[in-house]
Image (tube, rainbow, N blue to C red):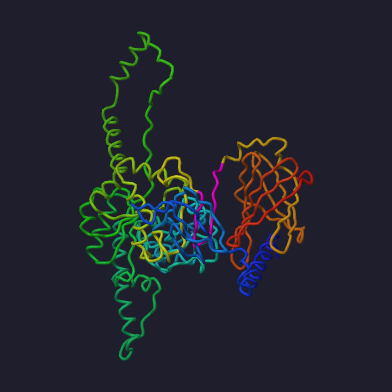
Amino acid sequence: MYTNPFRVLSCLIFLVSISSASLSGQNSDSPKQLSRTFYLKNCFVIPQPGSLLSGQNVIIKDGFISEIGTAVKIPFDAQIVLADSLYVYAGFIDAHSNTGIAKPENKDRAKVQDPGNPPNDVAGITPQISGSDLFKSLDKSVADMRSAGFAIAQVAPRGLMLPGQNSIFLLGEGANDKMLLKSNTSQNFQLEANRGVYPSTSIAILAKFRDLYKNANITGLHEEKFKLNPAGLSRPDYNKELMSMYPVTIKKMPLYFVASRTKDVHKALSLKDELGFDMVLTEVKQGWHYLDRIKKSSIPVLLSLELPEEDKKDTKKEGDAPEKKDSTATKDVKKVVKEEKNPEKDGFDQKKEASIKQYLEQAGLFEKQGVKFGFSYMTVKPADIRKNLRKLIQNGLSENYALAALTTHPAQILGISHLAGTVEKGKIANLVITDKPYFDEKATIKYVFVDGQKYEFTEKTKKTENKPSESGKMVGSWSYTVEIPGSTQKGKIIIKKASGEYKVTVVDDSAPSEEDSASDVIVDGKKITFNITTDMGAPVKVDFDLNFEDKSYTGSISVGQFGSFPIKGDYEGDPKY
Protein backbone atom coordinates (compact mmCIF):
# COMPACT_ATOMS: atom_id res chain seq x y z
CA MET A 1 0.00 0.00 0.00
CA TYR A 2 1.41 3.42 -0.98
CA THR A 3 2.24 5.76 1.89
CA ASN A 4 2.92 9.44 1.37
CA PRO A 5 6.59 9.67 2.47
CA PHE A 6 6.14 13.15 3.91
CA ARG A 7 3.35 11.96 6.19
CA VAL A 8 6.02 10.96 8.73
CA LEU A 9 7.12 14.59 9.07
CA SER A 10 3.54 15.92 9.11
CA CYS A 11 2.48 13.46 11.80
CA LEU A 12 5.58 14.34 13.82
CA ILE A 13 4.68 18.02 13.59
CA PHE A 14 1.16 17.18 14.66
CA LEU A 15 2.40 15.23 17.70
CA VAL A 16 4.78 18.03 18.66
CA SER A 17 1.96 20.56 18.46
CA ILE A 18 -0.22 18.40 20.72
CA SER A 19 2.66 17.93 23.16
CA SER A 20 3.47 21.65 23.22
CA ALA A 21 -0.17 22.57 23.83
CA SER A 22 -0.30 20.08 26.70
CA LEU A 23 2.85 21.47 28.29
CA SER A 24 1.66 25.06 28.00
CA GLY A 25 -1.56 24.00 29.75
CA GLN A 26 0.54 22.77 32.69
CA ASN A 27 2.67 25.90 32.86
CA SER A 28 0.97 29.16 31.93
CA ASP A 29 4.35 30.90 31.60
CA SER A 30 5.30 28.64 28.67
CA PRO A 31 3.96 29.91 25.34
CA LYS A 32 2.11 27.42 23.13
CA GLN A 33 3.91 26.21 20.07
CA LEU A 34 2.22 26.40 16.66
CA SER A 35 -0.44 28.78 17.96
CA ARG A 36 -3.57 29.65 16.00
CA THR A 37 -3.39 33.15 17.45
CA PHE A 38 -2.31 35.95 15.08
CA TYR A 39 -1.64 39.62 15.68
CA LEU A 40 -2.03 41.92 12.66
CA LYS A 41 -0.07 45.04 13.51
CA ASN A 42 -0.75 48.63 12.40
CA CYS A 43 -3.07 48.14 9.45
CA PHE A 44 -5.97 49.85 7.73
CA VAL A 45 -9.22 47.99 8.45
CA ILE A 46 -12.27 48.24 6.23
CA PRO A 47 -14.91 46.84 8.61
CA GLN A 48 -17.65 47.25 6.00
CA PRO A 49 -18.05 48.99 2.62
CA GLY A 50 -17.69 52.78 2.96
CA SER A 51 -15.77 52.66 6.25
CA LEU A 52 -12.02 52.76 6.94
CA LEU A 53 -10.11 52.66 10.24
CA SER A 54 -6.38 53.48 10.36
CA GLY A 55 -3.65 52.33 12.73
CA GLN A 56 -5.58 49.23 13.79
CA ASN A 57 -4.33 46.03 15.37
CA VAL A 58 -6.34 42.83 14.88
CA ILE A 59 -6.17 39.68 16.98
CA ILE A 60 -7.26 36.35 15.50
CA LYS A 61 -7.75 33.54 17.99
CA ASP A 62 -9.08 30.01 17.44
CA GLY A 63 -10.52 30.92 14.05
CA PHE A 64 -12.40 34.05 15.14
CA ILE A 65 -11.71 37.78 15.24
CA SER A 66 -10.95 38.35 18.92
CA GLU A 67 -10.09 42.07 19.11
CA ILE A 68 -9.79 45.13 16.85
CA GLY A 69 -8.38 48.46 18.01
CA THR A 70 -5.47 50.91 18.22
CA ALA A 71 -4.33 49.87 21.70
CA VAL A 72 -4.71 46.10 21.57
CA LYS A 73 -1.98 44.23 23.44
CA ILE A 74 -0.07 41.43 21.75
CA PRO A 75 -1.03 38.00 23.16
CA PHE A 76 1.96 36.07 24.46
CA ASP A 77 1.32 33.15 22.09
CA ALA A 78 0.58 35.20 18.95
CA GLN A 79 2.26 34.94 15.57
CA ILE A 80 2.87 38.57 14.59
CA VAL A 81 2.00 39.62 11.05
CA LEU A 82 3.65 42.95 10.21
CA ALA A 83 0.75 44.56 8.36
CA ASP A 84 2.01 48.16 8.37
CA SER A 85 -0.08 50.14 5.89
CA LEU A 86 -1.75 47.00 4.55
CA TYR A 87 -5.52 46.96 3.96
CA VAL A 88 -7.70 44.41 5.75
CA TYR A 89 -11.07 43.48 4.22
CA ALA A 90 -13.66 40.86 5.08
CA GLY A 91 -13.05 37.65 3.15
CA PHE A 92 -15.01 37.65 -0.09
CA ILE A 93 -18.06 35.42 -0.49
CA ASP A 94 -18.78 33.39 -3.61
CA ALA A 95 -22.59 33.22 -3.57
CA HIS A 96 -22.98 30.62 -6.33
CA SER A 97 -20.50 28.58 -8.35
CA ASN A 98 -19.11 25.08 -8.92
CA THR A 99 -16.03 25.80 -6.78
CA GLY A 100 -14.63 22.55 -5.38
CA ILE A 101 -16.90 20.39 -7.54
CA ALA A 102 -14.93 18.36 -10.09
CA LYS A 103 -16.08 18.30 -13.69
CA PRO A 104 -17.74 14.98 -14.60
CA GLU A 105 -15.88 12.63 -16.88
CA ASN A 106 -17.04 12.50 -20.47
CA LYS A 107 -18.92 9.24 -20.81
CA ASP A 108 -20.89 7.74 -23.62
CA ARG A 109 -24.55 8.63 -23.28
CA ALA A 110 -26.60 5.78 -21.85
CA LYS A 111 -28.99 4.13 -24.27
CA VAL A 112 -32.60 4.84 -23.36
CA GLN A 113 -35.38 2.51 -24.47
CA ASP A 114 -38.05 5.19 -24.14
CA PRO A 115 -36.62 8.67 -24.85
CA GLY A 116 -40.02 10.18 -24.05
CA ASN A 117 -39.85 8.85 -20.48
CA PRO A 118 -36.16 8.48 -19.53
CA PRO A 119 -34.82 7.74 -16.02
CA ASN A 120 -34.58 10.88 -13.92
CA ASP A 121 -30.80 10.95 -13.83
CA VAL A 122 -30.61 10.70 -17.63
CA ALA A 123 -33.10 13.57 -17.92
CA GLY A 124 -30.97 15.68 -15.59
CA ILE A 125 -33.44 15.48 -12.68
CA THR A 126 -31.26 14.87 -9.60
CA PRO A 127 -32.47 17.34 -6.91
CA GLN A 128 -31.51 14.87 -4.19
CA ILE A 129 -27.76 15.23 -4.90
CA SER A 130 -26.01 17.43 -2.35
CA GLY A 131 -23.00 19.64 -3.00
CA SER A 132 -21.80 18.75 0.50
CA ASP A 133 -21.07 15.20 -0.69
CA LEU A 134 -19.15 16.33 -3.79
CA PHE A 135 -17.04 19.24 -2.51
CA LYS A 136 -13.27 18.69 -2.29
CA SER A 137 -11.24 21.29 -0.43
CA LEU A 138 -8.04 20.39 -2.30
CA ASP A 139 -9.59 20.84 -5.73
CA LYS A 140 -7.56 23.39 -7.68
CA SER A 141 -10.62 25.63 -8.09
CA VAL A 142 -10.72 26.14 -4.31
CA ALA A 143 -7.11 27.31 -4.17
CA ASP A 144 -7.71 29.56 -7.21
CA MET A 145 -10.71 31.24 -5.58
CA ARG A 146 -8.84 31.60 -2.29
CA SER A 147 -5.93 33.29 -4.06
CA ALA A 148 -8.49 35.75 -5.48
CA GLY A 149 -9.57 36.65 -1.92
CA PHE A 150 -12.54 34.32 -1.39
CA ALA A 151 -13.05 32.60 1.95
CA ILE A 152 -16.60 31.20 1.58
CA ALA A 153 -18.49 29.69 -1.34
CA GLN A 154 -21.97 28.33 -1.88
CA VAL A 155 -21.18 25.40 -4.15
CA ALA A 156 -23.57 23.82 -6.65
CA PRO A 157 -23.47 20.31 -8.11
CA ARG A 158 -22.86 20.18 -11.84
CA GLY A 159 -25.59 18.87 -14.08
CA LEU A 160 -28.62 19.73 -16.20
CA MET A 161 -32.19 20.70 -15.35
CA LEU A 162 -32.16 20.02 -11.59
CA PRO A 163 -28.52 19.24 -10.75
CA GLY A 164 -28.93 19.21 -6.95
CA GLN A 165 -28.72 21.19 -3.73
CA ASN A 166 -26.20 23.89 -2.84
CA SER A 167 -24.07 23.87 0.30
CA ILE A 168 -21.92 26.58 1.88
CA PHE A 169 -18.25 25.84 2.56
CA LEU A 170 -15.22 27.62 3.96
CA LEU A 171 -12.49 27.66 1.32
CA GLY A 172 -9.76 26.34 3.58
CA GLU A 173 -7.99 22.99 3.47
CA GLY A 174 -9.47 20.13 5.46
CA ALA A 175 -12.10 17.46 5.67
CA ASN A 176 -15.57 18.31 4.35
CA ASP A 177 -17.22 18.28 7.77
CA LYS A 178 -14.64 20.79 9.04
CA MET A 179 -15.09 23.17 6.10
CA LEU A 180 -18.90 22.88 5.90
CA LEU A 181 -20.88 25.89 7.17
CA LYS A 182 -24.38 24.92 5.97
CA SER A 183 -25.60 21.96 3.95
CA ASN A 184 -28.50 21.83 1.50
CA THR A 185 -29.18 25.56 1.60
CA SER A 186 -30.95 25.89 -1.76
CA GLN A 187 -32.00 24.02 -4.89
CA ASN A 188 -30.69 24.63 -8.43
CA PHE A 189 -32.71 24.90 -11.62
CA GLN A 190 -31.56 25.68 -15.14
CA LEU A 191 -32.99 25.41 -18.64
CA GLU A 192 -30.42 22.84 -19.70
CA ALA A 193 -31.45 19.47 -21.16
CA ASN A 194 -29.96 16.17 -22.24
CA ARG A 195 -30.12 15.92 -26.00
CA GLY A 196 -32.43 13.32 -27.45
CA VAL A 197 -34.55 12.66 -24.36
CA TYR A 198 -37.50 14.39 -22.74
CA PRO A 199 -37.48 17.21 -21.71
CA SER A 200 -35.23 18.55 -24.46
CA THR A 201 -36.54 22.11 -24.96
CA SER A 202 -37.06 25.09 -22.65
CA ILE A 203 -40.84 24.73 -22.91
CA ALA A 204 -40.65 21.02 -22.07
CA ILE A 205 -38.28 21.68 -19.13
CA LEU A 206 -40.67 24.25 -17.66
CA ALA A 207 -43.61 21.86 -18.12
CA LYS A 208 -41.68 19.05 -16.43
CA PHE A 209 -40.71 21.37 -13.58
CA ARG A 210 -44.35 22.33 -12.97
CA ASP A 211 -45.29 18.67 -12.84
CA LEU A 212 -42.46 17.82 -10.41
CA TYR A 213 -43.21 20.87 -8.26
CA LYS A 214 -46.92 20.04 -7.83
CA ASN A 215 -46.28 16.36 -7.20
CA ALA A 216 -43.54 17.22 -4.70
CA ASN A 217 -45.98 19.41 -2.77
CA ILE A 218 -48.65 16.69 -2.71
CA THR A 219 -46.14 13.99 -1.73
CA GLY A 220 -44.54 16.08 1.00
CA LEU A 221 -47.82 17.15 2.58
CA HIS A 222 -49.06 13.54 2.59
CA GLU A 223 -45.85 12.39 4.28
CA GLU A 224 -46.18 15.09 6.96
CA LYS A 225 -49.80 14.13 7.66
CA PHE A 226 -48.84 10.46 7.88
CA LYS A 227 -46.11 11.24 10.43
CA LEU A 228 -48.51 13.26 12.57
CA ASN A 229 -51.36 10.72 12.51
CA PRO A 230 -51.14 7.66 10.24
CA ALA A 231 -54.61 6.40 11.14
CA GLY A 232 -56.69 5.99 8.01
CA LEU A 233 -53.91 7.12 5.66
CA SER A 234 -52.11 4.97 3.12
CA ARG A 235 -48.40 4.63 3.71
CA PRO A 236 -46.64 7.13 1.44
CA ASP A 237 -44.31 5.88 -1.29
CA TYR A 238 -41.05 7.68 -0.60
CA ASN A 239 -39.64 9.41 -3.70
CA LYS A 240 -36.22 10.93 -3.14
CA GLU A 241 -36.50 13.40 -6.05
CA LEU A 242 -39.92 14.71 -4.99
CA MET A 243 -39.03 14.89 -1.29
CA SER A 244 -35.88 16.86 -2.17
CA MET A 245 -38.09 19.36 -4.02
CA TYR A 246 -40.69 19.58 -1.24
CA PRO A 247 -38.85 22.26 0.84
CA VAL A 248 -38.96 24.55 -2.22
CA THR A 249 -42.76 24.22 -2.45
CA ILE A 250 -43.26 25.29 1.19
CA LYS A 251 -40.69 28.12 1.02
CA LYS A 252 -38.18 26.50 3.34
CA MET A 253 -35.58 26.41 0.58
CA PRO A 254 -35.06 28.97 -2.21
CA LEU A 255 -34.67 27.97 -5.84
CA TYR A 256 -31.56 29.31 -7.60
CA PHE A 257 -32.72 29.87 -11.16
CA VAL A 258 -29.77 30.12 -13.58
CA ALA A 259 -30.80 32.86 -16.02
CA SER A 260 -27.80 33.52 -18.22
CA ARG A 261 -29.85 34.20 -21.35
CA THR A 262 -32.07 37.26 -21.75
CA LYS A 263 -35.39 35.42 -22.02
CA ASP A 264 -34.46 33.11 -19.14
CA VAL A 265 -35.00 36.06 -16.77
CA HIS A 266 -38.55 36.51 -18.11
CA LYS A 267 -39.25 32.77 -17.80
CA ALA A 268 -37.91 32.68 -14.25
CA LEU A 269 -40.00 35.65 -13.11
CA SER A 270 -43.13 34.26 -14.76
CA LEU A 271 -42.63 30.81 -13.19
CA LYS A 272 -42.16 32.36 -9.75
CA ASP A 273 -45.36 34.43 -10.16
CA GLU A 274 -47.24 31.29 -11.19
CA LEU A 275 -46.05 28.89 -8.46
CA GLY A 276 -45.04 31.27 -5.67
CA PHE A 277 -41.70 29.77 -4.54
CA ASP A 278 -38.78 31.80 -3.14
CA MET A 279 -36.16 32.42 -5.80
CA VAL A 280 -32.71 33.85 -6.40
CA LEU A 281 -31.92 34.91 -9.96
CA THR A 282 -28.36 33.79 -10.57
CA GLU A 283 -25.72 34.04 -13.31
CA VAL A 284 -27.69 36.96 -14.79
CA LYS A 285 -25.95 38.43 -17.83
CA GLN A 286 -28.61 40.57 -19.51
CA GLY A 287 -31.07 41.47 -16.80
CA TRP A 288 -31.43 45.15 -17.67
CA HIS A 289 -34.23 44.28 -20.11
CA TYR A 290 -36.38 43.25 -17.14
CA LEU A 291 -35.03 45.65 -14.54
CA ASP A 292 -38.48 47.05 -13.60
CA ARG A 293 -39.90 43.56 -13.01
CA ILE A 294 -36.84 42.51 -11.00
CA LYS A 295 -37.07 45.67 -8.89
CA LYS A 296 -40.80 45.17 -8.29
CA SER A 297 -40.37 41.52 -7.28
CA SER A 298 -37.61 42.36 -4.71
CA ILE A 299 -35.93 39.03 -5.33
CA PRO A 300 -32.18 38.60 -4.71
CA VAL A 301 -30.01 38.82 -7.82
CA LEU A 302 -26.56 37.45 -8.59
CA LEU A 303 -25.00 39.03 -11.66
CA SER A 304 -22.54 36.97 -13.64
CA LEU A 305 -19.01 38.31 -13.39
CA GLU A 306 -18.12 36.87 -16.78
CA LEU A 307 -17.89 39.84 -19.13
CA PRO A 308 -18.00 39.92 -22.93
CA GLU A 309 -14.82 40.62 -24.83
CA GLU A 310 -14.66 44.07 -26.33
CA ASP A 311 -13.48 44.47 -29.91
CA LYS A 312 -9.91 45.72 -30.04
CA LYS A 313 -9.57 49.02 -31.84
CA ASP A 314 -6.42 50.29 -33.50
CA THR A 315 -5.08 53.26 -31.59
CA LYS A 316 -2.14 55.35 -32.68
CA LYS A 317 0.34 55.73 -29.85
CA GLU A 318 2.68 58.64 -29.33
CA GLY A 319 6.04 57.91 -30.90
CA ASP A 320 4.65 55.57 -33.58
CA ALA A 321 6.17 55.95 -37.03
CA PRO A 322 4.24 58.36 -39.27
CA GLU A 323 1.95 56.79 -41.83
CA LYS A 324 3.29 56.59 -45.34
CA LYS A 325 1.45 58.65 -47.91
CA ASP A 326 -0.64 56.51 -50.23
CA SER A 327 0.07 56.46 -53.93
CA THR A 328 -2.68 57.42 -56.36
CA ALA A 329 -3.32 53.73 -57.12
CA THR A 330 -3.61 52.88 -53.39
CA LYS A 331 -6.05 55.73 -52.88
CA ASP A 332 -8.20 54.41 -55.72
CA VAL A 333 -8.25 50.91 -54.14
CA LYS A 334 -9.22 52.29 -50.71
CA LYS A 335 -11.99 54.32 -52.35
CA VAL A 336 -13.45 51.19 -53.96
CA VAL A 337 -13.22 49.24 -50.64
CA LYS A 338 -14.94 52.08 -48.81
CA GLU A 339 -17.75 52.14 -51.37
CA GLU A 340 -18.17 48.33 -51.02
CA LYS A 341 -18.63 48.38 -47.22
CA ASN A 342 -21.54 46.26 -46.04
CA PRO A 343 -24.20 48.44 -44.35
CA GLU A 344 -25.76 45.37 -42.70
CA LYS A 345 -22.42 44.39 -41.15
CA ASP A 346 -21.81 47.94 -39.98
CA GLY A 347 -25.26 47.99 -38.38
CA PHE A 348 -24.61 44.64 -36.68
CA ASP A 349 -21.25 45.83 -35.35
CA GLN A 350 -22.86 48.97 -33.94
CA LYS A 351 -25.61 46.95 -32.22
CA LYS A 352 -23.01 44.57 -30.81
CA GLU A 353 -20.95 47.46 -29.45
CA ALA A 354 -24.06 49.04 -27.90
CA SER A 355 -25.05 45.69 -26.33
CA ILE A 356 -21.60 45.23 -24.80
CA LYS A 357 -21.78 48.76 -23.42
CA GLN A 358 -25.16 47.99 -21.80
CA TYR A 359 -23.72 44.76 -20.37
CA LEU A 360 -20.82 46.62 -18.77
CA GLU A 361 -23.14 49.33 -17.43
CA GLN A 362 -25.64 46.82 -16.02
CA ALA A 363 -24.15 46.64 -12.51
CA GLY A 364 -24.02 50.44 -12.22
CA LEU A 365 -27.62 50.66 -13.46
CA PHE A 366 -28.80 48.12 -10.89
CA GLU A 367 -27.04 50.13 -8.18
CA LYS A 368 -28.68 53.39 -9.27
CA GLN A 369 -32.10 51.70 -9.34
CA GLY A 370 -31.65 50.38 -5.80
CA VAL A 371 -31.56 46.69 -6.76
CA LYS A 372 -29.38 44.80 -4.27
CA PHE A 373 -27.14 42.22 -5.92
CA GLY A 374 -24.11 40.05 -5.46
CA PHE A 375 -22.13 38.10 -8.03
CA SER A 376 -22.09 34.51 -9.26
CA TYR A 377 -18.91 32.88 -10.51
CA MET A 378 -20.08 29.92 -12.61
CA THR A 379 -18.17 30.88 -15.74
CA VAL A 380 -15.57 33.51 -14.79
CA LYS A 381 -11.92 32.63 -14.22
CA PRO A 382 -10.72 33.54 -10.70
CA ALA A 383 -7.73 35.36 -12.21
CA ASP A 384 -10.15 37.67 -14.10
CA ILE A 385 -12.37 38.62 -11.14
CA ARG A 386 -10.61 41.81 -10.01
CA LYS A 387 -9.97 42.91 -13.59
CA ASN A 388 -13.66 42.48 -14.42
CA LEU A 389 -14.73 44.34 -11.28
CA ARG A 390 -12.51 47.25 -12.26
CA LYS A 391 -14.12 47.27 -15.69
CA LEU A 392 -17.60 47.46 -14.10
CA ILE A 393 -16.39 50.32 -11.91
CA GLN A 394 -15.12 52.14 -14.99
CA ASN A 395 -18.64 51.77 -16.41
CA GLY A 396 -20.60 53.26 -13.52
CA LEU A 397 -20.48 50.86 -10.54
CA SER A 398 -19.18 52.48 -7.33
CA GLU A 399 -16.28 50.91 -5.44
CA ASN A 400 -18.30 50.73 -2.22
CA TYR A 401 -21.12 48.87 -3.96
CA ALA A 402 -18.64 46.54 -5.69
CA LEU A 403 -17.16 45.70 -2.28
CA ALA A 404 -20.66 45.15 -0.86
CA ALA A 405 -21.38 42.75 -3.74
CA LEU A 406 -18.29 40.77 -2.65
CA THR A 407 -19.06 40.78 1.08
CA THR A 408 -22.17 42.07 2.83
CA HIS A 409 -24.71 41.43 0.06
CA PRO A 410 -23.88 37.74 -0.51
CA ALA A 411 -23.71 37.27 3.28
CA GLN A 412 -27.28 38.58 3.54
CA ILE A 413 -28.50 36.50 0.58
CA LEU A 414 -26.98 33.33 2.06
CA GLY A 415 -28.18 34.11 5.59
CA ILE A 416 -24.69 34.15 7.13
CA SER A 417 -24.34 37.84 8.04
CA HIS A 418 -23.91 36.84 11.69
CA LEU A 419 -20.81 34.85 10.71
CA ALA A 420 -19.20 36.68 7.80
CA GLY A 421 -19.25 39.64 5.44
CA THR A 422 -17.75 42.30 7.76
CA VAL A 423 -14.63 42.68 9.93
CA GLU A 424 -16.08 42.53 13.43
CA LYS A 425 -15.21 41.03 16.78
CA GLY A 426 -16.72 37.57 17.14
CA LYS A 427 -17.02 36.80 13.44
CA ILE A 428 -15.13 34.05 11.63
CA ALA A 429 -11.59 35.17 10.87
CA ASN A 430 -12.03 35.36 7.10
CA LEU A 431 -9.87 38.23 5.87
CA VAL A 432 -8.29 39.56 2.68
CA ILE A 433 -5.14 41.66 3.15
CA THR A 434 -3.79 43.78 0.27
CA ASP A 435 -0.83 46.15 -0.10
CA LYS A 436 -3.00 48.88 -1.66
CA PRO A 437 -6.76 49.50 -1.71
CA TYR A 438 -8.24 46.40 -3.36
CA PHE A 439 -9.60 48.14 -6.45
CA ASP A 440 -6.31 49.94 -7.14
CA GLU A 441 -4.88 48.70 -10.43
CA LYS A 442 -1.53 47.85 -8.82
CA ALA A 443 -2.91 46.23 -5.65
CA THR A 444 -1.87 42.68 -4.83
CA ILE A 445 -3.25 40.24 -2.28
CA LYS A 446 -0.62 39.49 0.37
CA TYR A 447 -2.57 37.27 2.77
CA VAL A 448 -5.92 35.53 2.97
CA PHE A 449 -7.22 34.15 6.26
CA VAL A 450 -9.84 31.41 6.11
CA ASP A 451 -11.31 30.27 9.41
CA GLY A 452 -8.26 31.78 11.12
CA GLN A 453 -5.79 29.90 8.93
CA LYS A 454 -3.23 32.08 7.16
CA TYR A 455 -2.42 31.76 3.45
CA GLU A 456 0.41 33.89 2.11
CA PHE A 457 0.76 34.84 -1.55
CA THR A 458 3.67 35.99 -3.65
CA GLU A 459 3.54 37.18 -7.23
CA LYS A 460 4.24 34.27 -9.56
CA THR A 461 6.23 34.43 -12.76
CA LYS A 462 6.15 32.10 -15.72
CA LYS A 463 8.38 29.16 -14.95
CA THR A 464 9.34 28.70 -18.61
CA GLU A 465 10.98 32.13 -18.57
CA ASN A 466 13.36 31.24 -15.76
CA LYS A 467 17.07 31.26 -16.53
CA PRO A 468 18.86 30.73 -13.21
CA SER A 469 22.55 31.47 -13.05
CA GLU A 470 25.01 28.61 -12.52
CA SER A 471 25.34 29.70 -8.88
CA GLY A 472 21.60 29.27 -8.51
CA LYS A 473 21.37 25.98 -10.37
CA MET A 474 18.44 23.96 -9.05
CA VAL A 475 18.42 20.78 -11.11
CA GLY A 476 19.87 18.00 -9.00
CA SER A 477 19.46 15.80 -5.98
CA TRP A 478 19.43 17.81 -2.74
CA SER A 479 19.38 16.80 0.89
CA TYR A 480 16.83 18.39 3.20
CA THR A 481 16.73 18.93 6.93
CA VAL A 482 13.61 20.27 8.62
CA GLU A 483 13.87 21.54 12.18
CA ILE A 484 10.72 21.28 14.28
CA PRO A 485 10.49 21.73 18.06
CA GLY A 486 12.19 18.74 19.65
CA SER A 487 13.02 16.87 16.45
CA THR A 488 14.86 16.89 13.11
CA GLN A 489 13.58 15.26 9.92
CA LYS A 490 15.78 14.44 6.90
CA GLY A 491 15.34 13.33 3.31
CA LYS A 492 15.95 14.24 -0.32
CA ILE A 493 14.42 16.70 -2.79
CA ILE A 494 15.00 15.77 -6.45
CA ILE A 495 14.57 18.50 -9.06
CA LYS A 496 14.49 17.66 -12.77
CA LYS A 497 13.84 19.74 -15.88
CA ALA A 498 12.45 18.50 -19.19
CA SER A 499 10.94 20.48 -22.09
CA GLY A 500 11.15 23.67 -20.06
CA GLU A 501 9.16 22.19 -17.16
CA TYR A 502 10.48 21.56 -13.66
CA LYS A 503 9.51 18.32 -11.91
CA VAL A 504 10.05 17.90 -8.16
CA THR A 505 9.87 14.77 -5.99
CA VAL A 506 10.37 14.45 -2.24
CA VAL A 507 11.78 11.36 -0.52
CA ASP A 508 11.81 10.86 3.24
CA ASP A 509 14.81 9.02 4.72
CA SER A 510 12.41 6.78 6.64
CA ALA A 511 10.88 5.54 3.35
CA PRO A 512 13.67 5.75 0.73
CA SER A 513 11.83 3.57 -1.80
CA GLU A 514 8.85 5.90 -2.02
CA GLU A 515 8.61 9.25 -3.80
CA ASP A 516 6.03 12.02 -3.58
CA SER A 517 5.48 14.21 -6.66
CA ALA A 518 5.05 17.95 -6.14
CA SER A 519 2.36 20.20 -7.62
CA ASP A 520 2.26 23.90 -8.57
CA VAL A 521 6.02 24.10 -9.20
CA ILE A 522 7.03 27.74 -9.73
CA VAL A 523 10.62 28.87 -10.41
CA ASP A 524 11.66 32.52 -10.16
CA GLY A 525 15.39 33.16 -10.47
CA LYS A 526 17.01 31.35 -7.57
CA LYS A 527 13.69 30.66 -5.83
CA ILE A 528 11.40 27.65 -6.19
CA THR A 529 7.99 27.03 -4.61
CA PHE A 530 5.87 23.88 -4.76
CA ASN A 531 3.56 21.78 -2.61
CA ILE A 532 2.69 18.19 -1.80
CA THR A 533 -0.39 16.79 -0.08
CA THR A 534 -0.31 14.46 2.90
CA ASP A 535 -3.09 12.53 4.63
CA MET A 536 -3.48 13.12 8.39
CA GLY A 537 -7.03 11.82 8.63
CA ALA A 538 -7.85 14.80 6.39
CA PRO A 539 -5.83 16.16 3.46
CA VAL A 540 -3.15 18.67 4.51
CA LYS A 541 -1.07 20.63 2.00
CA VAL A 542 2.64 21.14 2.67
CA ASP A 543 4.03 24.26 0.95
CA PHE A 544 7.77 24.56 0.19
CA ASP A 545 9.54 27.90 -0.36
CA LEU A 546 13.26 27.44 -1.13
CA ASN A 547 16.03 29.93 -2.01
CA PHE A 548 19.18 28.57 -3.69
CA GLU A 549 22.74 29.91 -3.45
CA ASP A 550 25.72 28.02 -4.93
CA LYS A 551 25.47 24.40 -3.73
CA SER A 552 22.98 24.89 -0.89
CA TYR A 553 19.58 26.34 -0.14
CA THR A 554 17.51 27.60 2.78
CA GLY A 555 13.80 28.25 3.14
CA SER A 556 10.65 27.22 4.93
CA ILE A 557 7.78 24.76 4.76
CA SER A 558 4.23 25.51 5.83
CA VAL A 559 2.15 22.57 7.07
CA GLY A 560 -1.54 23.51 7.06
CA GLN A 561 -2.65 25.06 10.32
CA PHE A 562 0.40 23.77 12.20
CA GLY A 563 2.64 26.64 11.11
CA SER A 564 5.94 27.17 9.29
CA PHE A 565 9.31 25.50 9.89
CA PRO A 566 12.85 26.16 8.60
CA ILE A 567 14.34 23.85 5.97
CA LYS A 568 17.85 23.69 4.53
CA GLY A 569 19.84 21.39 2.30
CA ASP A 570 22.92 20.78 0.15
CA TYR A 571 23.61 19.62 -3.40
CA GLU A 572 24.36 15.88 -3.59
CA GLY A 573 24.62 15.23 -7.31
CA ASP A 574 22.79 15.08 -10.61
CA PRO A 575 19.32 13.54 -10.65
CA LYS A 576 18.73 10.17 -12.31
CA TYR A 577 16.43 10.44 -15.33
- Which residue is nearer to you in this view: 537 or 201? 537
Q: As rendered, which of 424 and 520 lies closer to the eye?
A: 424
Magenta stretch holds residue 191: no
At 66% across and 40% down in the image, what residue appears? 526
Residue 346 percent location from the top left of the image: 28, 29
In which quadrant of the rendered view does residue 308 lie? top left
Residues 464 and 35: in front is 35
Number of numbered callouts drawn: 0
Give x and y (percent) for residue 465. Answer: 60, 36
Q: Is residue 11 left or right of residue 155?
A: right
The residue sitting at the front extreme is: 71
Query: Can you say whether 359 is above or below 178 in the image?
Result: above
Considering every residue shown, the one lying at the far right of the view is 573
Quick check: 557 left or right of 87?
A: right
The magenta span reads 446-460
449 part of magenta stretch: yes
Give the quadrant of residue 342: top left
Q: Magenta span: helix, strand or loop, mainly? A: strand
The residue at 33%/77% (across/down) is: 220
Q: Quick one: quadrant of the N terminus?
A: bottom right
Position of residue 425 in the picture relative to residue 525 (left or right): left
Residue extending farthest bottom: 231
Split into 4 quadrants, where in the image is the C terminus?
top right
Which x, y percent locates residue 217? 30, 74
Q: Nearer the viewer, residue 247 or 485?
A: 485
Q: Position of residue 247 (x, y in %)?
A: 34, 72
Q: Is residue 383 left or right of residue 535?
A: left
